[in-house]
Image (cartoon, rainbow, N blue to C red):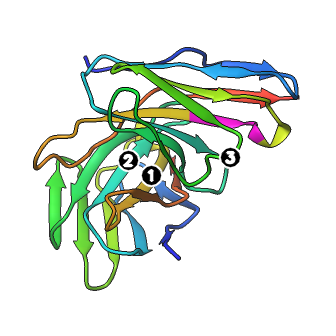
Amino acid sequence: GQNIDQPTEMTATEGAIVQINCTYQTSGFNGLFWYQQHAGEAPTFLSYNVLDGLEEKGRFSSFLSRSKGYSYLLLKELQMKDSASYLCAVKDSNYQLIWGAGTKLIIKP
Amino acid sequence: DVKVTQSSRYLVKRTGEKVFLECVQDMDHENMFWYRQDPGLGLRLIYFSYDVKMKEKGDIPEGYSVSREKKERFSLILESASTNQTSMYLCASSFSGMGDTGELFFGEGSRLTVL
C-alpha cells in the first residue's frame, strides 16, 4: 500500500529552528508538496520538490531525497504565526496525491 | 486574488437528508477536487473532475456523488446523509498545463455535522 509518515505533533520555541520530517512509500514518484494549514482555515501551498536537494524560500526550506523516500520542511526564525499543521503530500505514478496526516506545530514564546 | 469559495462553512443536517456542498473557483482551472479531512487521517479524495461534465471516483466515493455542469463550479452531493459523513469537506482546484506542478488551491472548507 501507499503510505506517508509524519510526526503527529511537534513543539518549538519562538525564534528557533524546527525540522518536520516526512517519509513515503508510494507507487512511483512525481513530486512532493508541503502545505500549511492554520486551524479552521484552508491548506495553503508552501513548496514543491521533484528533484533531490534543498529548495529555499525565505524562512522555509524543503529537502528531498528520492532514493531514501524522505523529505523535510525546515522552518527558521520561528514566529508565533507559524503555529499550524504542516501537510506532506506525494504525487504518485498516476499523478494522484497521497497525503500524510499532518504535523501539528506548536510554537511557545 | 485567486479564490476557491465553498458555499457553507458550517452545516448541521439530520440522518437521511440530502446535502449539497457547492464550490466555485475563479481561476479558470480545469481540475477540481473534493476531499474530506478527519482528525488523524490524511486528506482523502472523494471525487475529482478534469473537465466540464466529467467526473472520476477518488478513494472514498461511496455515499457521495458530484456534478460539474460549468467549468467554475463543482458540487458534492450526499444523497442520504449518515453520521459517519460528519467531517470537514475541502474543495480544491488546479491548473492543468504543461510543466505545471499541479499545486492545489483550496477553499475554506465546509464542516458538516450529521445528527
Q: Nearer the viewer, mark 3 or mark 2?
A: 3
Q: Which residues are magenta?
A: B85-89
Residue nearest the observer in this picture, B72 or A18:
B72
Quickly name the residue at label 3: B62
The span from disc 1 to disc 2 (Cα, nearest Å) is 6 Å
Secondary structure at numbered mark 1: strand
Which image quadrant for residue B54?
top left
Residue at the bottom extreme?
Answer: A67
Question: Is there a contact, CB below 8 Å, between mark 3 and mark 2?
Answer: no
Residue found at x 45% / y 38%: B55
Which chain does tag 1 point to? A
Name the dominant secondary structure of the magenta segment.
Answer: strand
Is residue A74 at all visible to an observer of this figure?
Answer: yes
Instruction: Return the residue at label 1.
Output: A86
Label 1 packing within 10 angstroms: few (<14), some (14-19), many (20+): many
A101 horizontally vs B99: left or right? right
- Which of the numbered marks, if any, corresponds to residue B41? none
Q: How far is the residue under mark 3 from the one under mark 1? A: 28 Å
SS at mark 2? strand
Q: Is residue A15 visible?
A: no
Query: Are the residues flagged by discs 1 and 2 in contact, CB closer than 8 Å?
Result: yes
Q: Residue at x 65, y 37 (%)?
A: B64
Secondary structure under tag 3 reads loop
Tell me the mark number nearer the camera, choosing from 3 and 1. 3
Q: Residues within 10 Å of mark 2 (few under 14, many from 20)?
A: some
Q: Earlier in the sequence, mark 1 or mark 2?
A: 2
Name the residue tied to disc 2.
Answer: A35
Spot occupied by residue B110 in the image (x, y as percentages of width and height): 60, 26
Q: Is residue A77 above or below residue A8?
A: above
Q: Amino acid at mark 2?
A: Tyr
Taking depth in this image into account, of B19 and A53 the one nearest to the observer is: B19
